[in-house]
Amino acid sequence: MTSPPPPPALDLDTLRDALEAAVHDACEAIRTVMRRGSVRVGHKWGEGPVTEADHAADEILHRRLTPLITGAHWLSEESEQEHPLVPGEPTWVIDPLDGTREFLRGLPEFGVSVGLFAEDRLVLGAAGLPAGEEPVVYSGLVTDGRSEARVDGVWLPTLDGSGVDADGEGDPGRIVVSRWDYEHRRLQHRLPFDVYPLGSAVVKLVHAATGEAGVYLSTGPRSVWDAAGGAAVLAAAGGVILQTNGQPLHLSPQQERIPPFVAGAPARATALLRSLGVEV
């Protein structure tokens, strides 16, 4: 009995262009709902609100992305999984509107998160931010020998890797945390650094990827679709995601829930963990 032929190699450059365009259009769908002034809201049992904007963005992404890779799997927070996931096979991991609560509160802290996994590795991703005057789309391509981050098609600079202060001590820089951790757990009073809040994980990961934040501290757990798009951008910009024991965090569609982590330039992420007493 002959084995089936291997799947064709992915053309990640072409996929990146198509992904950026699809995420831009998903952002526009969210903005269309925003401009109406009223939003239809439902609730997922045990998980929180879901809006017509979530569904509109998910529909566009599904329609635009699924034809790009024959047989690719689909894992989205807002639509049904059509087939069982198969480890190693190409899989799109989607959160069409990460930060629904912030969206409903009128806070500009929500975004679109898309990651593509192949051979159990995150190889491509995008993060779309709809809330400004125009949508902004970040993307990250990470394969053997290539790490390329872009924003609206323009190359994104690699993160500053210094991570030390004027005295030569490890310096994580500004720390971005969730609104829950800031407003309820008051982490800003428990960390000896400049701490500020943001809503969605994808926006916080973008802040870490651009250096606006030194480190994103997630007390988790979170879902893989929350992090996949921003994680690809961060990795392509030279950043890392570390578990709170200092070990690298490897995302996978096979593991929906992900543990607490720190994300940022390697030296800054390590500096934060050391300040928390972790030996790294």
Image: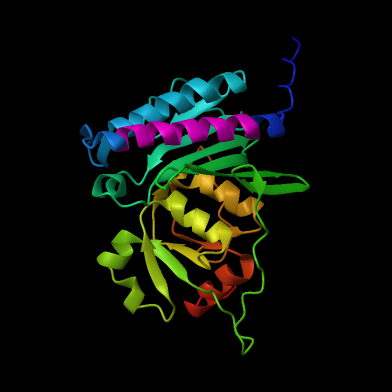
What secondary structure prevails in the magenta region?
helix
Which image quarter holds the C terminus? bottom right
Q: Quadrant of residue 188?
A: bottom left
* 2 sits left or right of 268 in the view: right
The picture places residue 198, in percent across and down from the top left corner, at 37, 59
Q: Is residue 55 visible?
A: yes
Residue occupying the far right of the picture: 145
Q: Nearer the viewer, residue 165 or 224?
A: 165
Which image quarter holds the N terminus? top right
Q: Is residue 256 visible?
A: no
The residue at 35%/78% (across/down) is: 190
Residue occupying the far front of the picture: 133
The residue at 48%/47% (across/down) is: 227
The residue at 21%/31% (across/down) is: 40
Q: Nearer the viewer, residue 154 or 15?
A: 154
The picture places residue 259, in percent across and down from the top left corner, at 44, 55
Magenta stretch encompasses residue 138: no
Q: Which residues are magenta?
A: 16-34
